[in-house]
Amino acid sequence: MKKVLRLKKRHLIVLLLLVSICGFSQSRYISTTTKKIVFTRDGGVCQCCGSSENIEYDHIIPYSCGGSSDVSNIQLLCMKCNVLLGAFELQDVEILKYLKKYGKDYGSKI
């Protein structure tokens, strides 16, 4: 009986590990191909301020809000802009998307 329980626990642990690994690979991970396309499309510069230093790949609609890692939902941001935009705790994802899209010019467009 104890041996059966130990096997079931091991199977459960292995199953949980596999699920977590699969979940990670389908979540925030951005493929090399997607990164190359986005880098070319965005010209290698931050889409908010135009800087080419400390560039990061950013989900326009956060993964936690249902965003994907498709080319259409990824943009280049410098570390500074990414941190600043990430500080917004907005309930409306469309507002967040708008702010990230227009970056430094958003004040004149609202």
Image (tube, grey):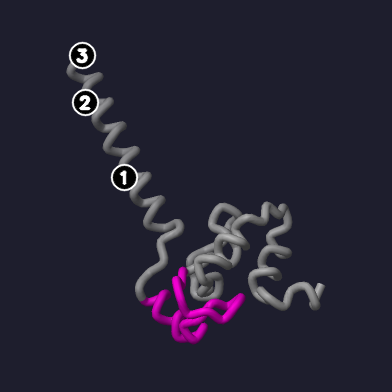
Sequence order check, earlier mark of 2 and 3: 3
Which amino acid type corresponds to the residue marked 2 in the rendered image?
Leu
- The residue wearing badge 2 is 7
Disc 1 target residue: 18
Q: Which SS class for mark 3?
A: helix
Figure quadrant of the N terminus:
top left
In the image, which is nearer the foreground, mark 2 or mark 1?
1
The answer to if 47 sits in the magenta stretch is yes
Q: Is residue 12 magenta?
A: no
- The x, y position of residue 104, in whole percent, is 68, 75
Q: Which segment did they paint magenta?
A: 33-56
Quadrant showing the C terminus: bottom right
Label located before the other in sequence (3 or 1): 3
Identity, as a three-letter code, of the amino acid under mark 1: Leu
Q: Is residue 64 left or right of residue 103?
A: left
Mark whose residue sits in front, 3 or 1:
1
- Real-space CA distance between mark 2 and mark 3, rounded to the nearest whole angstrom: 9 Å
Task: Give the SS element for disc 1.
Answer: helix
Neighbours of disc 2 within 10 Å: few (<14), some (14-19), many (20+): few
Check disc 3 and give the amino acid type: Lys
Left or right position of 7 against 47: left
| Residue plotted at (29% across, 33% down) | 13
In the rendered structure, the answer to whether residue 2 lies left or right of residue 13 reads left
According to the image, label 3 marks what residue?
2
